[in-house]
Amino acid sequence: MKLLTHNLLSSKCLKGVKVGYPLRIVAKDVKISESEYNMEFVLKMIPKLDWKVLVNAAEQIGHGNNLPIELIEDYEDDEELLKKIHHVLMEVEVINGELICPETQRIFPISAGIPNLLLNEDEVS
Amino acid sequence: MKYFQYLLWFAHEHVPFRLIEIESIASALKIPIKWLEPPSDKPWYLVELPSEEAVQKLSSRSVTMRRAIQLWADELTVPKLHATLKEKCLNGILEPYKSKSFKVDVDLFCNSQTQEEKLERIESFSYMPFQGHVNLKNPDVIFQFIEYYGLDPNTAPEYPTRAFFGRVVAESGRTLIHELSLKKRTFIGNTSMDPQLSLLMANLGKVSNGDLVLDPFVGSGSLLVAAAKFGGYVIGTDIDYLMLHGRTRPTRKQTRHIARKDESIEANMIQYSCVDKYIDVIVADSALPFWHNDVEFDCILADPPYGIREPTERIGSKESLPIVKKEGSPVHFPSKVEYGLNEIIKDLMRFSSKHLKLKGRLLFWVPVFREDYEETHMPRHSCFKLIGNCEQVLTTFTARRLLVFEKIKIPQDSDECSCTIPSSSTFREKYFTHGNENRLTRKQKKAIAAKNKEIWFAKLNDANVK
């Protein structure tokens, strides 16, 4: 699971959970892979992201990459920053670990890089 | 600069998809098209395009087109075509290509030719002042000659009703169809979408560089491969844990006895060198809301399960107070309940109304029983405008339709959504029984027809005798 995906997922499908965001990450294995930098993609992605959640998630798993706590306004022209963001979004991957619901502490396992968000029959609202 | 017309020359398949494909690509690439002839079912479109570069961009993505040709002559008969071409050669149309290596391709639509006839046709252009060598393998320029004999091979005339000649400007994206062939793909499932239709979906979805694309019923990821090939960054979800982990029963008959190994959607992405565009796949039930509220996709593509080869299921229990049994495996496999096709589609549309960008496209297939088909049964939602509804015939009785929607407004609580495909609850049942029934009625009909014929002949003989 890439940190980009983490930024988009919630646990609000659980019965009784209202927001369920952000999910806490427990990373057992982290893999750093290479992915070709694509400026257009990063620029399209940034407005869709919750910036603070991204920075926190990256720090939680030890790959903070010196991202600024607040996103600077003219990020479009800062190629160095865009490349850093691309790295955190697409190149840091949790292979084995857990996603944890912030409200109920329900654990969603990540195995072979694939998060399992399936609920049990009795958790469906 | 001289202004030229272009002929987009198509392969004769998936005809209903042609126009919407070309329009979608042009719109995604922001290329204006001027129609010189209203688009028809004939295997070509005559257009004016702003530049040769635009033509190349357009054709390199199309999978219904064969190639694009800069039109030099377009006449109703072959002799007239030669006359026009001779005149144009005198005016120097061939000048820039005169000394280059070349070849001439000949296509006959609705007719066939022997090798000798083909050579004869090529030789008929010998008046053109070529100076370069003929090079069949790797020529600098390719010329295309086309004879059109109508659309119906049973009533094809002796002479062509239209003839074209021109210079090939661009080949189409059809080479991708072979490149993505399911035969050589690492990981396939029982219902993997064939590459041409997957690519077609990505084109109709206007997938462009850097787009965020979702397939909520991802299966073995065929649609993701196509979307990634056109620059989309892809995410897929599926309820089937074993499928996403590449541990289902092997699909290929020859290797049924060997368990899958290192098979996954990611492996496919690596195979086709588009792993840079692969974000993630997630095991999740698309009937449940697990995306963060603000998530917005640029395009949503899906081939939902119809209940024929993949079950239509969601998490649930038939018991009112479900008890989760403890299992030996570390992964819990929740029990599932039937999830009707109409419900799947309505949920998909409601989901997309929230999570698709404005003007973004939602595409999915629905199965239809051809004789029951009515447009009013098709899904609709007040946030979406239906812009494409193309039929792919599967058998005499069944077909599937690709519906293309564009999001036209922000969702509200008052939004209405309906989908009443009659076959959806019984499609499976009908699918397996309808054919038999019909074979029987066909037999009966034949018997009645034969009897009537006999009676008619008897009457005729009677009359003759009298």
Image (spheres, helix red, strand yellow):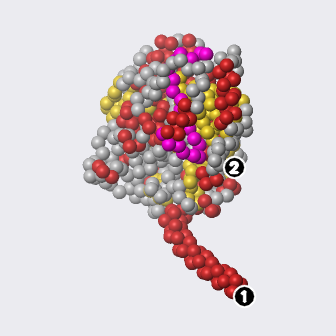
Query: SS at mark 1?
Result: loop
Residue bearing mark 2:
B416
Of pointers 1 and 2, the one earlier in the residue sequence: 2
The stretch in magenta equals: B95-115
Q: Nearer the viewer, residue A80 or B192?
A: B192
Q: In front of the other: label 1 or label 2? A: 1
Indicate yes or no whether the magenta region holds residue B60. no
Residue pictured at 30% horizontal, 39% vertical: B262
The answer to whether residue A3 is visible is no
> Which numbered dot is residue B466?
1
Q: CA distance from mark 1 to mark 2?
A: 72 Å
Where on the picture, by quarter, is residue B69? top right
Q: Is residue A25 left or right of residue B133?
A: left
Identify the residue at horizontal 31%, vertical 54% (top origin): B327
Residue B452, how many percent across, how many down?
A: 64, 79
Specify the amino acid type for callout 2: Glu
